Amino acid sequence: MQYEKLTKAELIRILRDRDVAAAKPFLTSNTPHLPCGGSNSSSYHCLLNEFPALVWRSGIDGKCNFFNLNWLAFTGRTLEQELGDGWAEGVHPDDLEKCLSDYLSAFHARRSFDIEYRLRRYDGEYRWIHDVGRLLTVDGQFNGYVGICFDITETKKTDLMLQDKLEEISDLYHNAPCGYHSVDGDGYIVAINDTELSWLGYAREELVGHARLSDIMTPECRNGYVERFQTFKERGWIKDRELDLVCKDGNVITVLLNGSAVYDDNGNFKMCRSTLFDITERKRNERLILSHQEQLKLLADNLFHAEEMERKRISGDLHDMIGQSLILSKIRLKRLSEELEGRSAAALIDEIIKLTDESIQQVRSLIFQISPPLLYEVGLEAAVESLGERFYHEHGLEVNVRTRYASLSLSEGLRVTLYQVLRELLLNVVKHVDARQVSVVFDKSDSLTITVEDDGNGFNVEDVMSANKGSGYGLFNVRQKIERINGSIIIDSSLGRGTRVLLNVPL
């Protein structure tokens, strides 16, 4: 028989099921070594020596009285050295006490045993041995043990490597910088890592198998969860879902959840595996930033209104003081000119009157630019029409203003902002796009829409907006003003076909 090809279990079965009666002389003999020959006992002895394993035998006194050739070759010791308790000299000191204790315990109880220990090989290396001891009985009476030993060192190394990997995976799972958990089809938590438990403050046994994920959500977050979970089970994934979870101490943390479904071979949902990142601090910082942005917006609005009030004050002072004084000076100079008519001083006075008249026009223009009275007294549309007339007289730009509604009431701040935006856009047309005509169309529905369109040579919007944020065209300031009133701006332009700007402002 080719014993080398047999498994460990098959080798043990052969020894157990062999015709013990035929080997009775061997089993009852105290002779440790018999030559192979034709007798049944010596044939059984040859069987043991041919085994591709280490074989030993002990008597009713518990002492070993036989070791096969493989054992002796493995240990490098003589049969005489191993007999009795001599074999124990080769057992690793750290394993000897347990090895002997397990053997003697089985011996006194008259039962079979399986033990593992390290045995010194002929080269001095300790190898792990799996020792399988089975009872020997003759005529129903206990007659000692026969044992088969297998070198399991490589298996042990593999087991240790596997254990190390399992511990590494377990450490990665439990101590990862993110939370991990799994929930079953009913939403119950079936696994959770230490990181997530440390966030929540719960013990594992308080959650696993006892709590649904929804049980630790805030009421607002729990609302609609059943429907969302059902959708997830059908779709198989969820990405970047924000959840608010209630910790054991009552504090709330915000997490970002990503999950994937696990299905069985029939496509039935088994569980969800999820990763979670604690974004509580990030959300707190976002709220702080939003709060600061609101404060800055409020401050900007206050500065804007303060600036506009100062514009109105300066405009009023120019009109009431300097403007009135110039007009009065002009009237008196004209009267003086009439009285000196025909004299040489009259020509000089006429020149002074002309200069005074120009100063009056300049003051009026300055008043209009700083704070146009029409904007406050009549409205935005009228002020833009007047602005268009000034652009025509000063720059030759024809501005056509159309209104597609009967009337519209706007707050003073909104009127001022839109007027400044439109004035900036018209200045852009004059400075940059070489247009002859511009149309300004006012329309309204749920919001106010203003369309400014010219017939100029246009520009590349992306290039202009990326170059110093459009500062050369004033577009950055325009966008800032529109965003401050919660509006939006769309710019459509390209080289050679003009520009169309769409302003949209909520009412």
Image (cartoon, rainbow, N blue to C red):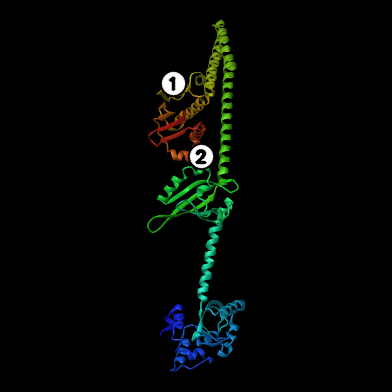
Q: What separation in Å lies between label 1 and label 2 (alpha carbons)?
A: 39 Å
Q: Which mark is residue 468?
A: 2
Is disc 1 placed on a helix, strand or loop? loop
Task: Give me the residue at 40% from left, 30% from top.
Answer: 454
* Residue closest to the eye, 469 or 502: 502
Tell me if mark 2 has few (under 14), some (14-19) or many (20+) residues whose alpha carbon lies within 10 angstroms of its own. Answer: few
Which circle, 1 or 2, is nearer the viewer?
1
Is disc 2 placed on a helix, strand or loop? helix
Residue 360 shows in this picture: yes
Q: Which mark is residue 505?
A: none
- Residue 188, above or below 119: above
Which quadrant is the N terminus positioned in? bottom left
Task: Give me the residue at 44% from left, 79% from top.
Answer: 10
Image location of residue 332, percent across then percent down: 58, 9
The kind of residue tagged 2 is: Asn
* Residue closest to the eye, 435 or 444: 444
Read off the residue under disc 1.
Answer: 407
The kind of residue tagged 1 is: Ser
Task: Give me the residue at 45% from left, 49% from top.
Answer: 238
Q: Earlier in the sequence, mark 1 or mark 2?
A: 1
Image location of residue 131, percent across then percent down: 53, 79
